[in-house]
Image (tube, rainbow, N blue to C red):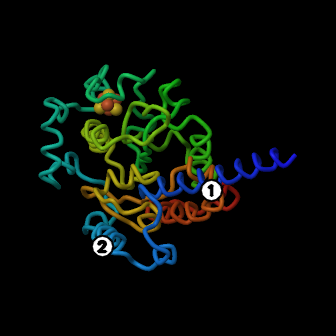
Amino acid sequence: MSTRLTELNDNIIFATLRDYVEQLAEEGLDGPPMSPASLHGECSPRTAAAAGEGARASALSPAAARNERPEAGASRAASGAAAALFSAYPGLEETGDLAELRAFIGDCRRCKLAGGRTHLVFGVGNPNARLMFVGEGPGADEDAQGEPFVGRAGQLLTDIIERGMGMGRAEVYICNVVKCRPPENRKPEPGEIAACEPFLWRQIDLVRPQVIVALGSVAAQSLLKVKTPISRLRGSWHEARGIRVMPTFHPAYLLRNPADKRLVWSDVQQVMKALGLPAVKPGRPR
Ligand code: SF4
């Protein structure tokens, strides 16, 4: 009996620790807080630097503040880094639409994620969407079906779009930072993100959304080029190459931490306001 109780206690402790580590990972932290002070919101040099990054990212350009759609090719014009990004893959910038971009990517083997995939998960939705969701990478369901956000987390995202925002899933565009599934659902490595980044930015260039919602730490940190935890990035507007970006928690994180749905709901309401969408009272996400 006492052995059974010990096993139960061990299981509970393990599950609690796992949830805690998953939460740290989602927030973009690779270890536990350094001191009790950080648990109470006092800034360490590390978090102070991170807050500075976030503050810089929050200053919107006049075009983004006016909520205009970017001009064609704006991301390249906005940054010399973008030019270098596209020049890594000659011909990428000449792709004229999403079908051409998909054909360009082809049976991509530019990073080691290619070795474990069933399908390359390109993206789905309206090629002229005003609103784009960018996630981290395909999971098992997405890898099997070749479409982003189709598993349990995908169902929650669909609920947010349809019941929360009153839009159709087909009205928006949905894709991920990396197009191939990382093994064991681990986070994509920096080299894998870098290898796939030109494809993501060409997708963004071609869709030219007014607003991007970055789902989770990997998407937010990749788009904004910061290391700030998602818990500090979310809830305020940022900008990436002339486009408004609203970081928020990833739906997979919400499945483990349902209490934080209220924070995502608050972020989503800001997005709806920016897009001029009417409030949808009965459709609040579960
Ligand atoms: S993750 Fe991106 S860069 Fe890597 S193989 Fe897949 S499509 Fe190519």
> Which residue is found at the position 56% from the left and 43% from the top?
168
The residue carrying mark 2 has its beta carbon less than 8 Å from ligand 1: no
86 versus 272 height, above or below = above
Q: Nearer the viewer, residue 73 or 44?
A: 44
Q: Residue furthest right?
A: 1
45 versus 110 height, above or below = below
Q: Measured from the top left, where is residue 284 in percent x and y?
A: 66, 58
Q: Nearer the viewer, residue 281 or 215?
A: 215
Q: Which residue is mark 1?
A: 257
Any part of residue 46 in sight: yes
> Which residue is found at the position 62% from the left and 39% from the top?
152
Q: Which of disc 1 and disc 2 is earlier in sequence?
A: 2
134 versus 240 height, above or below = above
Q: Badge 1, how many Cα within 10 Å: few under 14, some, many 20+?
A: few
The number of numbered discs placed on residues in the rendered structure image is 2
Q: Which residue is mark 2?
A: 52
The amino acid type, in three-letter code, at marker 1 is Asn
The amino acid type, in three-letter code, at marker 2 is Gly
Q: Measured from the top left, where is residue 206 in percent x and y?
A: 29, 40
> Which residue is found at the position 20% from the left and 51% from the top?
74
